[in-house]
Each structure stands twice: as structure tokens, then as C-alpha cells.
């Protein structure tokens, strides 16, 4: 069976895990955490990067930093993972869903302005599959209405928009290092902070509401509870595992792009025959090969195709069920405007196996099996 995903592992992972254990330092903010954070700052150009226990927690931190309160409204696409919405629901906000663009499955930037009310506090663009949203329009709207922009760049590490790293354009950016992502620490994430004036409070929130970070830097002689916060620090073991991959980041990224391009080229004829649609990469975006998906005719054809692929040794999966269709989505959110594409396009989308280490012959088998399905 060709599996859908296999978590990446750097060649020095076991060495670094042993080093962390031997140093008797396995809680957060040790040497490996600092190495990862520094690498991410250099890679993205972000003013400050804080490693977190998950992208979910990075998004929760951004909601706290933006002072989201009960009754506020936050605009986002419905086609996203539940964490995008949960971070703001936990603050008492109402989630306002708007439709996606059918080409990229990203939020339709031209529909955001009509969804804004006096209660709107933030826009949360989600860079689906590591392909950037149209950020110039989104930032222009945010500036005019004085709204925060929190980028869900969970899938966007090493992707860019007009040369800018995803997660660095808005006020905050949130990365994921879950086992399904290009780089993994099992469970983990990072918060990217654009403006240095927000760093101190972010450190306090991340350290359970204490000024402990300043204490360890020798800036104060004792630390205490100064704000609301939680425990958002990942274990040093997780950071050590991640660091082994970041050392090889260019190689891993290039490998995924080569896999993506192989899929794209081998499936061209199926698109020309009208059987599938391949992903669209806008000119403004440099993507990271995070995901390769196809779109088929409808949900019935997709269901048959998933079954056929599985019977022939290929594990392919669909993705999100739109949040506004979920029970919690109806309770905590509202779809504003017409659902022209979110539901229809999500029901057509099928993700193909993609991971570091996927072999050329396995990609060829996936593509050949797809061809046989339509034969």
C-alpha cells in the first residue's frame, strides 16, 4: 500500500534527541528551541518567531494578542481546519465564513469587504496547500478598516507571496509542524510576529502569563504572574527532532517540489481529457510542494475513485468538510454571502500521496492507477 503520508525524519534526529536527554534539558526553550527559532527568523525574515506546542496554540496566542473579545467577529474561509476557528471561538468571538476562490481554494479576497461590520476585528486568510492568498488586497482592506490580519500559514513554510514569506505579511503568522507537514516535530507550531512591540506580551502569554523569559535573560531578578496566558512551550525533545529537518530544509523542500512537478506533468493528459483538474499556482506565489490534489467531477465520482485506489494499493484522501456545515460551525459561526464554491469544490477535491521519501515508481503507480480508473 502506498501510504498517504509519512512523517519526515532528519538524519541527525536520534543524535540530537540523545544530546537533549544527556544535557538534562528536555523542557521548553533550550538550545534546540533557540536554534529552530533563529532558523525560522532567518528563513522568513520575521521580526520574532516563537516555537509553540501546535499551530492551534500559535493561533490562540494571536487571538489573545489581538485582544479578541466576546461579541467580536472574525472573517475567514469555511474551507479550513477547525483550529482556525476554534482559536477565536474560545475568546467568545463569532466566526464569519466567506466563500473561496475555486482556483486556489483560498478565501476570495473580493468578498471580504462585504462581510465586514462594526463588530469585525480580524481577517484570517488561510494559505491552502502552501499556495498564497492574494495578500495585497487583504492587507489593503485591513488597513482601511483598521483590522488585524492573522495568517494561517500552517501549510506554508518556505512558500512566498511576491517574495515575502507566508506568515510575515499580516500582524501574526501561524505555522504548523504536525506530522503531516513538510517539517514535523510530531505536534508543534510557531508564531511569527511582525511588529517588535508585540514580542514582550507574546513571550508572557506563552510562559503562562509570567515574565519568565525576561528572568532567564537576566533582565529582572525574579519572575511573576503579570498577564493571562497558558503553557505554549514545546518540549526540547520535539525541537531537537525538528532541528534535524531544518538543517536539511532545502533538500526536503526541493524533493517535495520534484514530486509535485512529477504528478503535475504525468497527469496533464487526464486534465486535457476533461477527467480531472490539477492545482493552480498563481504568478504571485512560490509554493512548497506541501500537497498535490486533483479535482474530479463530483462527490460520487470521488467516493468511487477513493475506493478504487485503495483496492489497488493507493491511499488517497479527501480533505476538510466546510466548517459552516458542521454542528459547531452553525453554533459559533455564520456564512456571509453565497456558498458558490466552498461546498461544491471541497466535494470534488482528492489529495494524493505526498511525503519526503516518496519514490518515483510510487508516483508512477498512483498516476497509472488513476488512468485505469477512467479507462
Image (cartoon, rainbow, N blue to C red):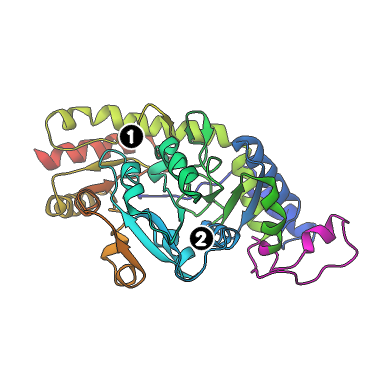
Give the mark, 2 or 1, whose residue is nearer the N terminus: 2
- On the rendered structure, is 341 left or right of 22? left
Instruction: Please state the horizontal and vertical placement of residue 325, each as a whole percent of the image.
Output: 26, 64
Question: Is 332 rendered above or below residue 300?
Answer: below
Q: Quadrant of residue 108?
A: top left
Q: Looking at the image, which residue is at 31% across and 64% down? A: 334
Instruction: Please state the horizontal and vertical placement of residue 197, each as a whole percent of the image.
Output: 70, 49
Of 354 and 94, the residue lying toward us: 94
> Circle 1: is it few (<14), some (14-19), or many (20+) Cα within 10 Å?
few
| Front of the two marks 2 and 1 | 2
Q: Give the range drawn in magenta.
A: 205-234
Q: Quadrant of residue 229?
A: bottom right
Q: Looking at the image, which residue is at 11% across and 30% down? A: 273
Name the element at disc 1.
helix
Name the dominant secondary structure of the magenta segment.
loop
Question: Is 84 rendered above or below residue 32?
Answer: below
Residue 106 seen: yes
Name the element at disc 2.
helix
Q: Which mark is residue 361?
A: 1
Q: In which quarter of the image is residue 370?
A: top left
- Is residue 32 located in the magenta-colored stretch of the structure? no
* Total numbered badges shown on the rendered structure: 2
Q: Residue 208 carries which label?
A: none
Task: Work out which residue is located at the far right of the displayed protein and give it.
Answer: 221
- On the rendered structure, is 17 left or right of 299? right
Q: Looking at the image, which residue is at 87% across and 56% down? A: 219
Report which residue position mark 2 lands on: 56
Instruction: Please state the horizontal and vertical placement of residue 94, each as a whole percent of the image.
Output: 40, 66
Amino acid at each position: 500500500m502506498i501510504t498517504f503520508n509519512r512523517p519526515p525524519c532528519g538524519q541527525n534526529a536520534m543524535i540530537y534527541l540523545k544530546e537533549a536527554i544527556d544535557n538534562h534539558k528536555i523542557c521548553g526553550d533550550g538550545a534546540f528551541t533557540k536554534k529552530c527559532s533563529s532558523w525560522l527568523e532567518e528563513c522568513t525574515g520575521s521580526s520574532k518567531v516563537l516555537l509553540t506546542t501546535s499551530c492551534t496554540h500559535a493561533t490562540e496566542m494571536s487571538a489573545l494578542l489581538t485582544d479578541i473579545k466576546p461579541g467580536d467577529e472574525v472573517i475567514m474561509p469555511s474551507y479550513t481546519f477547525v483550529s482556525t476557528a476554534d482559536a477565536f471561538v474560545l475568546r467568545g468571538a463569532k466566526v464569519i465564513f466567506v466563500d473561496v476562490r475555486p482556483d486556489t481554494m483560498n478565501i476570495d479576497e473580493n468578498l471580504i469587504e462585504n462581510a465586514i461590520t462594526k463588530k469585525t476585528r480580524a481577517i484570517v486568510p488561510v494559505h491552502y496547500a502552501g499556495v498564497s492568498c492574494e495578500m495585497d488586497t487583504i492587507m489593503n482592506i485591513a488597513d482601511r478598516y483598521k483590522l488585524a490580519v492573522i495568517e494561517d500559514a500552517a501549510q506554508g513554510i518556505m512558500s512566498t507571496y511576491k517574495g515575502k514569506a507566508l506568515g510575515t505579511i499580516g500582524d501574526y503568522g501561524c505555522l504548523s509542524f504536525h506530522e503531516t507537514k513538510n517539517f514535523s516535530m510530531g505536534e508543534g507550531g510557531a508564531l511569527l510576529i511582525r511588529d517588535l512591540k508585540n514580542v514582550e506580551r507574546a513571550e508572557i502569554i506563552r510562559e503562562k502569563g509570567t515574565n519568565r523569559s525576561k528572568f532567564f535573560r537576566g533582565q529582572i531578578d525574579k519572575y511573576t504572574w503579570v498577564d493571562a496566558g497558558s503553557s505554549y512551550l514545546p518540549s526540547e525533545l520535539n525541537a531537537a527532532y525538528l532541528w534535524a529537518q531544518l538543517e536539511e530544509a532545502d533538500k526536503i523542500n526541493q524533493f517535495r517540489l520534484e514530486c509535485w512537478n512529477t504528478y503535475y506533468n504525468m497527469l496533464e493528459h487526464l486534465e486535457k481529457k476533461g477527467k480531472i483538474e490539477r492545482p493552480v499556482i498563481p504568478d504571485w506565489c512560490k509554493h512548497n510542494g506541501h500537497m498535490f490534489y486533483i479535482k474530479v467531477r463530483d462527490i460520487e465520482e470521488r467516493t468511487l475513485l477513493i475506493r478504487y485506489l485503495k483496492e489497488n494499493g493507493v491511499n488517497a484522501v479527501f480533505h476538510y468538510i466546510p466548517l459552516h456545515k458542521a454542528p459547531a460551525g452553525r453554533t459559533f459561526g455564520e456564512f456571509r454571502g453565497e456558498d458558490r464554491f466552498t461546498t461544491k469544490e471541497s466535494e470534488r477535491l482528492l489529495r494524493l500521496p505526498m511525503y519526503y521519501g516518496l519514490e518515483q515508481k510510487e508516483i508512477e503507480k498512483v498516476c497509472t492507477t488513476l488512468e485505469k480508473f477512467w479507462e
